[in-house]
Each structure stands twice: as structure tokens, then as C-alpha cells.
Image (cartoon, rainbow, N blue to C red):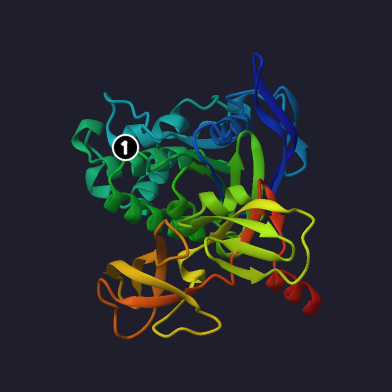
Amino acid sequence: MSIEIANIKKSFGRTQVLNDISLDIPSGQMVALLGPSGSGKTTLLRIIAGLEHQTSGHIRFHGTDVSRLHARDRKVGFVFQHYALFRHMTVFDNIAFGLTVLPRRERPDAATIKAKVTKLLEMVQLSHLAERFPAQLSGGQKQRVALARALAVEPQILLLDEPFGALDAQVRKELRRWLRQLHEELKFTSVFVTHDQEEAMEVADRVVVMSQGNIEQVDEPEQLWREPATRFVLEFMGEVNRLQGTIRGGQFHVGAHRWPLGYTSAHQGPVDLFLRPWEVDVSRRTSLDSPLPVQVLEASPKGHYTQLVVQPLGWYTDPLTVVMRDEEPPYRGERLFVGLQHARIYHGNERIETREDIALAESA
């Protein structure tokens, strides 16, 4: 079941929460709405579910406009962060609940309900807990029950609002893998809200990065890392070094170091330079690619690489985080050399092209 979100706006009083949001979600995809608090991601999810109504715009499921349909008529499953299980009902009865309250003409008979719930219990690996009550379950088990209850009515679309946010780190990882496997098996269309970048990258087919009621970028997880479309995405998605510098003529200056942009930029003056840790060239010897001296402050082995915090020597004041893949990890206090050739340069939210950008454009 595909979802089309067309020009959705939402305001609460004078506060604009969503600004002309448009998004297409193909049938069978799992999509993450990712962003900080206040980005509008949960409001958008609730509008898809019919729990909130947009100020303007349309929601279509498989081409059918559902904008005016009540939530119960949209055939959507919804999983909340805090489970919303009935405390006085067993696991079995919680899962069966949605089936038992269907209109009489749609309600399955008791035998069919029992068979369906039994199958769902097997699917979520909780058959042995069917007669327990929510108070007797762990957080991870409660969330599986909530998911099974949402799937019991065979929703066309499954929506999840920070489904693992209340769980500890190890349980979150296990449930993420399990949810992804379940999605591969059932192929339902799913949209989930999260502020956890790792969760979005691990589970989703595509990630929608939101900020202040706007969509910043929609892309596959790997592409978000490698080709952030905006400064916000670059800074929000993972660790990044930020250095303040200046453009003068056709050169970029950072501290006591400068190198040519390859052209004279229209912008002259202060700029910000961004480099992810693995984009910094690191070497034990000075070279054209790594001319800038640094000293190792911290070295953290990570298996196939070592993450370093290094202090620039004489050319910048703030430490940098970099990655070194040498077989022999550097020691604290060791002198290394780094290069910043792969940096992205921004003036405010406007990206300034570098020589590498121009070379890539000319070779394309």
C-alpha cells in the first residue's frame, strides 16, 4: 500500500509545525522519519494515521484520498512508544482485542481469532507467554505484544512512534533486527518515527530527515552519510569536525594554513569547514595530501581502525576527531600529519565549491 503525502501544512494556533510537506512512500517500503525534537516528525506520523488533521494538503493511500477519513477507517496499525497495553488483559487477549471489537459483519469467529493470535504469538516469539499479564513482561516483550496487536487486524500500513525509545540499548538493538526481519517476511508498508540515527540507518529502506517542519533530505541510509544535501543533514547525521576559516581571493584560510579553492569565490569572508572523521587524511609522514602537524591526545582502538582525538600544532586551536587505519595504532603524544582536502565549506547554509567539487563536476 503506497502513501502519497501532498503539500501537507499543519499549524497549532499561530505556530506552524509542518511547512508544505510532500513525500511519496512506495508500497512495501520501511521509511524512517528522523529528526530532533520539534522537527514535526511525530505530527506528520499522526496525520498519516488520522490522529491529527492537517491544516491543508492531502494524504492518499494507493491513490485513494483518505484525508477526511477517521483513523479507524484508514486500516492503519499504530504502535506507540509506551505500549498502551491493557493491564487487566493477558498477552493473548491484548493481541486479540482489535479483532474482537471489529463491526459484527467484519468480525472473525472465535476459532479464527484464536488461530490468528496463535500465529502472531509464534511470529513475535511469545507463545510461551500467552497467559501472562503486561506487568509480568519485560519492556522488549511488551513492545512485541504491541506490535502483534497492531498486526492482528491486518493493517494496510504500519506506523510506529519511537517504538524502541523506552527500552535499554541492548534490547533496542535486538528488536531493531527482529523488526527488520519481520518486515522482510511480511512486506508491509511501514513508517516509523525516531530521533536515533543508528536506528534509522539500520532498519529503514529510506530515511526522511526533518528539521523545523521541513524535509531536509530523503535518501537511502548510506547516501545520507556520503552525500548530505544540506548543512543540517551534514551536522545532524553522525560525528563531524567543524573548523572556522576565511576565504580571501581564491584561497581558503584556516588558522595559519591556506590552500587554493581553484577559483575565486563570490563569497569572501568567514566560512565553516566540515569533515567527518574518516574524511581527514592522516599520515605518519608529511606530504602534499597530509601537510598539517597534529599531536595525538587520545587513541581508541575500534577493531579494524583507531579513532583519534588530535590537537593541531600551530595552525588551529580546537582538537579534531579523526580515523586511522594503520596496522600499528599511534600512541598518545605521537606526532602525525593531516590533510583537509575533502572538506565541505559552508557560508551559513550555502555550500561553497572547492577545487575537488569542480573537478568532480567537470569529470561527470
Label 1 Cα crowd, 10 Å radius (few <14 / some 14-19 / many 20+) = many
Residue 304 vs residue 210: left or right?
A: left
Q: Where is 81 relative to 1, above or below?
A: above
Type of amino acid under label 1: Phe
In the rendered view of the protein, which quadrant contains the C terminus? bottom right
Q: Nearer the viewer, residue 86 or 304?
A: 304
Q: Where is 264 relative to 66, above or below?
A: below
Residue pictured at 70% horizontal, 68% vertical: 261
Please state the total of marks drawn on the protein image: 1
| Residue 139 pos. (x, y %) | 27, 40
Answer with the quarter of the image where residue 10 lies: top right
Answer with the quarter of the image where residue 259 lies: bottom right
| Residue 153 pos. (x, y %) | 51, 38
Q: Is residue 30 visible?
A: no
Answer with the quarter of the image where residue 16 lies: top right
| Residue 206 pos. (x, y %) | 59, 55
Q: Nearer the viewer, residue 139 or 195?
A: 195
Q: Where is 78 relative to 224, above or below?
A: above
According to the image, label 1 marks what residue? 92
Q: Name the element at disc 1.
A: helix
Residue 346 vs residue 126: left or right?
A: right
